[in-house]
Image (cartoon, rainbow, N blue to C red):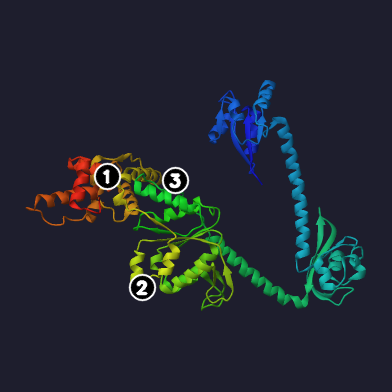
Amino acid sequence: MARLKVAIIGGNEEGHSIYRMLKAVDEVDILGMADANPESPGMVAASADGIFTTDDFTRLVRIPGVDVLVEATGDPEIHMQIHRLKPRETAVMEARALDLMLAVLKEKEKLQEARRIQGELAAILDSVMEAIEVADSRGIIKYVNAAFTRITGISEKERIGENIFKTSPDGALAIALRTGRSVMGHRTTVGGSNAEVISNAAPILVDGKMEGAVVVFQQFTDIMKLMDQLHQSTTIIENLSDKFGQVTTSKYSFADILGNSGELRRCIQLAERAARSNSTVLLLGESGTGKELFAHAIHHAGPRRDRPFIKVNCAAIPESLLESEFFGYAKGAFTGAVKSKIGKFELAHGGTIFLDEIGDMNLSLQGKLLRVLQEMEFERVGGTQTIKVDVRVIAATNRNLRELIRQGKFREDLYYRLNVVEIVIPPLRVRKDDLPLLVNNLINKLNRKLGKKVQGLSRDAEEVLYGYDWPGNVRELENVIERVMVTVDEEILTKKHFIQHVSQFKTPLERDIDLIPIDQMEQLLIKKAMAKFGTSVEGKRRAAQALNISLATLYNKLKKSRIEDYN
């Protein structure tokens, strides 16, 4: 059902009341509210909710795509202008008419709900395996379900209207009517048939008065079948409980990926394009660069955003358990498998499975994964039933898969199956221009978490962060900032707070420098400047400033010195 787009003209008490009612309706989108008085209750409420508000109702009338304009002012002149200015396809409804419509709809919904419940109850009673028979206080049979006819061979027409005291005087239903008490586990033969049954009956009490009774019974030979079905139902419920407990969806979007460096923006743009398809994505990058963040964002921006997002860390699960984690296992597949288990691929059906650290997967499982990617089907461990799934695969690794292929540790065919869209996430050391944005975001987040009031970093603290290569990337940055903020109470973080956390990782001088040729010294200084400020255009500009040379001169020296990594 298409969502209804509504705009409200009039923020008075009546308009405010209508706004509150429509806001609670799931199928309605409120596009805006207009009132000459911005302090009217409706305008204040709409503005607080982030709804577009204006003091010029004609702007609201001209918003494209409005299905219904609600006129709550009661002003005839405004009413005439609305009809004159509105698009032909837009309907106009006065507030009182809307109130009436909503009241009618509520009553209609109540009636429909009552009919639905009645229909569901009848369907339930006719679908249960047990026979059900109902009689009034005089013993006149009023209702039998479909199972009654199946078990006894007596049709509904033959039974309804008869008196239970004549048809089955020794049955549980007759006993419950005579005594006014419940009867449990009564074994008898149904009157008019040869069906031997086990019955439970109870009186029907209304305001303390017995109005009749109901009996539920089943053939004695069906009791064992019932126990088997109960066991199967219990297994299904346990599996569903396991499934609901494991299914998650994405937690992050592209808005959560912070950074303005050219390298990162190119990655985000490629990921956004990939998100619109169902193609397999391979995320490459060092540990801590944000591969999982990208995986969440791709799922969130794609057509499967409302379906499951299941993560499997291939490095964290023992090899002996990885196959059963992927595909699940059947009951009895191995010692201790007392019930079946749903695997990650089955949990991800209709959604996305994120295979983190794919480079750590053993060759045997790589072959089985390749089959799933090609055929979208598999069998549980120890099972024979083929299970078909529809999943999108996003894989990630910090390892060099091409080198692993050369070493015979990774299947080349699987690599090409995974590498449909390859996204290489840059390390933090080559996008140090993003440090201020990342640090400020972390400080704000940790202020809320830790109850601190840190305002920022001093210049010498920034120099420490810029001068460090961050081998652990953004994850290490988060760790360092949190460790510092936990241990200090100052509002400005300085060099002394950071130096103890990063100095131990600093690369020592490549050699003691006494006397070396000037050109070698120049290359060494250029390399250190590039390592400190990064290889982006802005990083090179900062490096040139630190070296007290022009940007053009820096480019010439990079080219002349053949420093390929920075050129």
Residue 524 to residue 335: above or below: above
Quadrant for residue 509, please give it. bottom left
Dot 3 crowding, Cα within 10 Å, few <14, some 14–19, many 20+: few
Secondary element at image label 1? helix
State how far apart marks 2 and 1 are (Cα).
39 Å
Q: Position of residue 463 (x, y in %)?
A: 24, 44
Q: Are marks 2 and 3 in contact (CB under 8 Å)?
A: no
Could one spot residue 277 in this view of the protein?
Answer: yes
Residue 408 to residue 439: above or below: below
Disc number at residue 164? none
Q: Position of residue 440 (x, y in %)?
A: 35, 42
Left or right, 204 with respect to 492, comes to right
State how far apart marks 2 and 3 are (Cα).
39 Å
Query: Label 3 sits on what residue type?
Result: Ala
- Which residue bears the numbered disc 3? 255
Secondary element at image label 3? helix
Given residues 350 and 164, the one toward you in this image is 350
Secondary element at image label 2? loop
Query: Label 2 sits on what residue type?
Result: Gly
Q: Residue at x 90, y 73 (%)?
A: 192
Between tags 2 and 3, which lies in front?
2
Given residues 565 and 382, the one toward you in this image is 565
- Which residue bears the numbered disc 1? 539
Q: Are marks 3 and 1 in contact (CB under 8 Å)?
A: no
Between tags 3 and 1, which lies in front?
1
Q: Are marks 2 and 1 in contact (CB under 8 Å)?
A: no
- Which residue bears the numbered disc 2? 408
